[in-house]
Amino acid sequence: MSQPRVYGMSTSGNCYKVRLLLEQLQQAYEWIEIDVRTGLTRQSEFLGRNPNGRVPTLEYEPGKYLAESDAILVYLAEGSAFWPQQRLQRAQALQWMFFEQYSHEPYIAVARFICLMLPAQHERRADLPRLHERGHQALAVMEQHLARERFFVGDSYSIADIALYAYTHAAADGGFELQRFPAVNAWIARVESQPHFVPMPLVN
């Protein structure tokens, strides 16, 4: 295999992170579309690639796989301008990426899933008030930082921005009020003005 292969669902923010970085790296890659709603990720063939049964999964060499979106970002960004050179800045990038996975994605991404993927009367809609409360708290943390800084690590666009942009820009899909966060909105515009930016496809 002459280029990496990504198993992903195009409308997933976690998968979109990987696609956006690959496009901005101008790295050739093969994309294998996997709709997790079909149950394909729970079948033995896919579980052989990623025992956790999730996308994205990166096949970086034939038969060798790497899972977890932010780990994939670090692997792909190594040696590029998207991964900071300074020790402290690398740690700061990871700090924001851990924040995204633990304090941001579980609320903003899950609310988006409930609103876009589940029926209007689904019982999980009862979770939305709690998800909105915690998600707005995460957006407020981002707002505080972005009121002082252009990007999340120093003055440079990095994979920390890619990780946080993926679900933040689509937060309104889950009922979040992005207009409450002007610095976040200005940052979203800065991300979208970066070279070789590609948008995330809309959910069908």
Image (cartoon, helix red, strand yellow):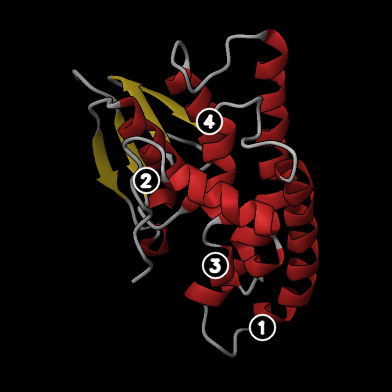
Mark 3, Cα crowd under 10 Å, few <14 / some 14-19 / many 20+, is: some
- Residue 157: mark: 4
Mark 4, Cα crowd under 10 Å, few <14 / some 14-19 / many 20+, is: some
Mark 1 is on which residue type?
Glu
- The image shows residue 88 at horizontal and vertical percentages of 73, 14
The residue positioned 52% from the left and 23% from the top of the image is 74
Is residue 20 shown above or below 179?
above
Mark 1, Cα crowd under 10 Å, few <14 / some 14-19 / many 20+, is: few
Give the mark count: 4
Mark 4 is on which residue type?
Tyr
The residue positioned 77% from the left and 76% from the top of the image is 129
Q: Are marks 1 and 3 in contact (CB under 8 Å)?
A: no
How many angstroms separate mark 1 from mark 2 (CA)? Answer: 27 Å
How many angstroms separate mark 4 from mark 1 (CA)? Answer: 39 Å
Q: Give the residue pinned by disc 1.
A: 123
Mark 2 is on which residue type?
Gly
Q: Quadrant of the C terminus?
A: bottom left
Q: Earlier in the sequence, mark 4 or mark 1?
A: 1
Q: Is residue 2 left or right of residue 26?
A: left
175 and 81: which one is in front?
Answer: 81
- Residue 95: mark: none
Q: Where, by quadrant of the figure, is residue 176 drawn? A: bottom right
Mark 3 is on which residue type?
Phe
In front: label 2 or label 4: 4
